[in-house]
Image (cartoon, coloured by chain):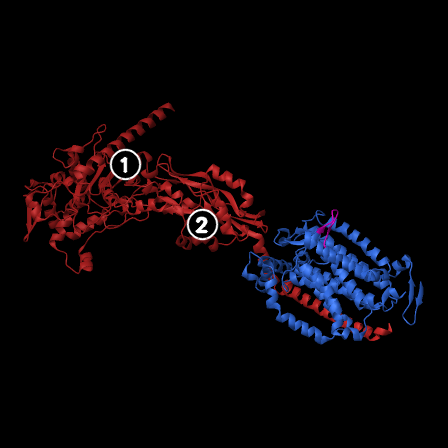
Amino acid sequence: MRLFLDRNCYFKDFEMSLQDKLLNMSWSFFFLICCVVGIGLILLYSAAGGSMEPWAERQFFRFILGCGVFFTILLIDLRFWMKYAYVFYAISLLLLVAVDVRGVVGMGAQRWLDLGFVQLQPSELMKINLVLALARYFHGSSKEDIERTTYLIIPIIMMLLPVALILLQPDLGTASMLVFVTGAIFFLVGVQWWKFIIVGLVGLASIPIGWHFLHDYQKQRVLTFLDPERDPLGTGYHIMQSKITLGSGGLFGKGFLEGTQGHLNFIPEKHTDFIFTVLSEEFGLVGSSVLLVLYMAIIILGLRMALKSSNFFGKILALGLVVNFSLYVFINTAMVMGLLPIVGVPLPLVSYGGSAMMVLMAGFGFIECVYVNQEMVIGRLGLQDE
Amino acid sequence: MTWQADGVKEITRRTFLMGGIQIALACVLFGRMFYLQVIEADKYKMLADKNRIGVRLIAPPRGLILDYNDIPLAYNRKAFRSVIVAEDTNGSVRSTLLNLSKLVPISDEEIERIVKEIKQKRSFMSVRIKDDLSFDEMASIQLNIPDLPGISIEDSLMRVYPTAEKSAHAIGYISFMTEEDLKEQEKLQKMPDVRIGRTGVEEFYEEKLYGKTGTRKVEINAVGREVRELEKQDAVPGENLRLFLDSRLQEIGYNALKEEAASAVLIDIETGGVKMLVSTPSYDPNIFNAPLDMKTWENLSKNERRPLMNKAIAGLYSPGSVFKIVVALAALENNVINEHTRIQCDGRLLVGNHPFHCWKKNGHGALNLVEALQHSCDIFFYQVAYDTGVDKIVEMAARLGFGEITGIDLIGEKGGLLPSRLWKEAKYGDAWRRGDTMNLGIGQGFLLATPLQMALMMARVAGQGKKIIPKLAQSEEVKIEETLDISPKNLKLVLKGLNAVVNERGGTAYHTRINVNGQRMGGKTASTQIRRITLKEREEGLKQQHELKWKDRDHAFFVGYAPTDRPKYALVVAVEHGGGGGSKAAPIASEIMRKVLELEQIDVETKKTKESQK
């Protein structure tokens, strides 16, 4: 490894061979990911009534494809990603517009863009590209910059554009995740506490106004979440059945392939958003704790890897992506346990679904990319300085 | 990175904070999982089982009702019904029903009933929509089944009564349980949409005919489809019920009475078996298979001739001259009179200042008991009743079955009214008077009896004083041992009088005598007034019965037995407002009895030829 360090931090040259990168990447991080995917495949096998068809097998190939994306991203120079961060952001913003204009209607919402050979979900892409763009923006910021309120206007707009487009689809889950990720990045780079408190208060005050903009089915979900008994056969059904499935698993579960709730189809979407219930029902508290611990390990390890980075862009990028991942975990599990209203957020790496798998693997690729380039120092103005 | 040295410190600090928050969140999630999966686990396990296990009830096929010759009086026909399971409709019961009503007409009332029933039941239980679907209806439902979530077609059994209105009152009918029935019948573990017996032997032998409900525990998936059967307990079919009733006699009896508001009962003296029980006007029990429309129901329930009432067991009448048999036996048993006692009839008898009239204005002259019965002389029985006293008459009447239900295997039987000193004092606070005794002597006054009681009295008298109990259903014990302790000599004397009524010139039913290969019928006529006859009317000459309005005509009765030499059958014919016992009831009775005797001879002959063929 050759390392050129400019003490003034204006100039750096940094080269690593692909081999070095593979040697220096965090294999334990990758191993944890594989463990979670493995659990996911077992659950998809069970959800299909003990069959690789129709989900487990396809999910496996998607994971292989996802690994390709993962390694591609981690092997590409971090500076490349930084250089084109805004471009990627702009592309996914355009795709979002495209999806709103002529998207394929699926699941009651326009989320997919049919590219002929693959159906793309630009809102998923945006989860990464927004983090890239924000990381790029804050890379050159000083503490004084960040503490200036006006300095935050641009990143807020950067967030609001995709959020608005996604809300039009409508997809409340993804939109709120973007808001949360942006908020988390603001928090991490050091925006003052009191600003969060003010935004929080304003947010609370505007709930009644926001209520009017919700779709009927979204209102139903929120109301039913607050009182599931209100409509046990309608929207409350999912919450009730989900809790029943979880609870009936007990400490050790009913055994692999022995879950009655899942196999008798009491759980809707058991292979996607509600797959956590399959785990809880068949493997009990023990099984679901194992998965939760694995997720926490990925998150903690991810945070550690991010902090190792010597450059601000990498730090923010990796932290943002870890936060994004943890949001998936927390929102999905809390929703399944009846702690949050039902929003369409999958259980990361486990739920059946192509777009989410690709985006998550890409995210992990970026985190590894940041990790292998941890000693790279990037000037304040980025690559233009070279 | 000098420009952001502070920033790096801040970001590290805040990352640790963030990590702490995430660990805290994970702890919350774990706590929630622990709560659901350990603390509340039992509750959710139960709920999951409830989700998973459905109990389906299996209706047992109802037992058949067979007549004496094993000809079915009630049987089951295979049919198809549409049912709805609420939980399979995913909450849109009404819209599903509306969709269905486009294919199969369902009235709004029925929809309300279904919706109400669904609310009352557990959601996995099926609720009947329409029974006895036609082939076309079934086909169109099957075709559209994907658009009718929760609707399915089931086998069902419809009850068929081949004798229709001819045996309606004896057999009864079945109909769906009402809410009250359900409360009562809970212990029988019946299904709410099962039909149960109403009136007749269908109701009396409900438990026997119904059998036992079976259950099937099935694993069901979220849309209510059965995945597999976990446990099955077969239904126990209802037992068949054999009756003494003969469907041929039912036809004879019904045809003889169908123009009247009347009833007739034929009792087999040897066994007490009821071979015929008819009440008219009647109704077709098959109509209760489908929901009744209001008009049909009102025609039945508001008709002044009361088709729904079983007049044989629930019609209460003054038995009139029929009761003279009882008075005669009471007097004979208490040695008040004997066969030689003669009493003078001048057409009028004064008790104190009150005159009692004989139906024959100019009187019968001096009569003995046999002649008095033959001519149905009122004066004779006024005098005999007076001499015997109310207590002894009442005691004999009770022995012969008056004043108490006979114990026939039917529901809704009336016990009638046998007045006594005590009864009158309790009821009216008034002492029993001589006039009351005299009225009782000719079966009028307070006395009320059902036609069945009259037939039973006839059977007991003709059956040598054996304590016969009338029964519709055959059972093991048929031998009647208990007797009423009446001297055979006295019974014979009374029967001699009853023989004279029909078979001797001058008897009140002489014109209706029969002779089937030497077999004859004896009996007694009776006509009972509905209105009081005023003095003025009596002087002006009585109006002919057919001149009166139907409602004002006399009730007409005939009790009879046959054959006279070896009594086998006891019969009553009671015609409401029929006019006269001799003119109306006796001809019907003799027609029935003639056919009964003829039929018996045919049966005996066919039996003989069958045996000789063997």
Nearest the viewer among B181 and B330 is: B181
Nearest the viewer among B518 and A47 is: A47
Question: In the rendered structure, which segment of residues is drawn in magenta?
Answer: A113-121
Coordinates of residue B313 in the picture (x, y in percent): 28, 46
Nearest the viewer among B166 and A307 is: A307
Q: Name the residue under label 1.
A: B253
User: Is residue A284 visible in this depiction of the protein?
Assistant: no
Q: Residues within 10 Å of mark 1 (few under 14, many from 20)?
A: many
User: Is residue A141 visible in this depiction of the protein?
Assistant: yes
Mark 2 belongs to chain: B
Let me know if residue A145 is in the magenta part. no
Q: Quadrant of the C terminus of chain A?
A: bottom right
Mark 1 belongs to chain: B
Q: Quadrant of the N terminus of chain A?
A: bottom right
N-terminal of the pair, mark 2 or mark 1, is 2
Report which colour depicts chain A. blue
What's the residue at 57%, 64% (across, down)? A227
What's the residue at 76%, 51% (across, down)? A62
Coordinates of residue A368 in the picture (x, y in percent): 83, 61
Callout 2 amino acid: Ile
Quadrant of res B381: top left
What's the residue at 74%, 70% (across, down)? A152
Q: Which mark is residue B111?
A: 2
Q: Residue A113 carries which label?
A: none
Report which colour depicts chain B. red
Coordinates of residue A212 in the picture (x, y in percent): 59, 63
CA distance for labels 2 and 1: 42 Å
Compared with residue A343, is residue B300 higher up or lower down, i.e. above or below? above
Nearest the viewer among A68 and B472 is: A68
Compared with residue A95, is residue A296 higher up or lower down, i.e. above or below? below
